[in-house]
Image (cartoon, rainbow, N blue to C red):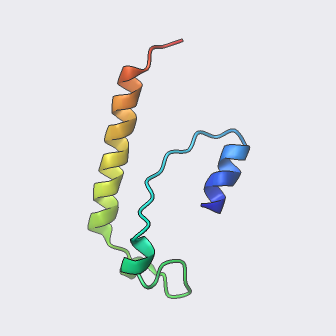
Amino acid sequence: MIATICLLKLGYVVAGLYDGEAVDQNTHYHSSIDIPSAVNTDYIVSTTKLLLATILQETRNTPCP
């Protein structure tokens, strides 16, 4: 979340999905044992698809300047 705030302050557009339960479901979350093998890749793929679909839908609904 800190990185997101920093990017916004620098003028970058930031899109993200936040799941408050991630900390409860992933005991490795943001710790020294948070390694690639502990990542639920199926969950990452599904949320990435959701985010991409949302961005595509929003760009279709936004008129060009």
Q: Position of residue 27 (x, y in %)?
A: 43, 85
Left or right: where 38 falls relative to 8:
left
User: Farthest residue toward the right?
Assistant: 10
Quadrant (top left/top right/bottom left/bottom right) for the N terminus: bottom right
Left or right: where 18 falls relative to 30:
left
Would you place residue 43 above or below residue 63 in this image? Answer: below
Q: How many marks?
A: 0
Left or right: where 10 falls relative to 63:
right
* Residue name at image x 66 percent, y 53 percent: 5
Q: Quadrant of residue 55?
A: top left
Would you place residue 23 above or below residue 1 in this image? Answer: below
Q: Position of residue 2 (x, y in %)?
A: 65, 61
* Residue name at image x 31 percent, y 47 percent: 50
User: Farthest residue toward the top?
Assistant: 65
Q: Position of residue 65 (x, y in %)?
A: 54, 11
* Residue name at image x 50 percent, y 45 percent: 15
Q: Quadrant of residue 23?
A: bottom left
Left or right: where 19 falls relative to 42:
right
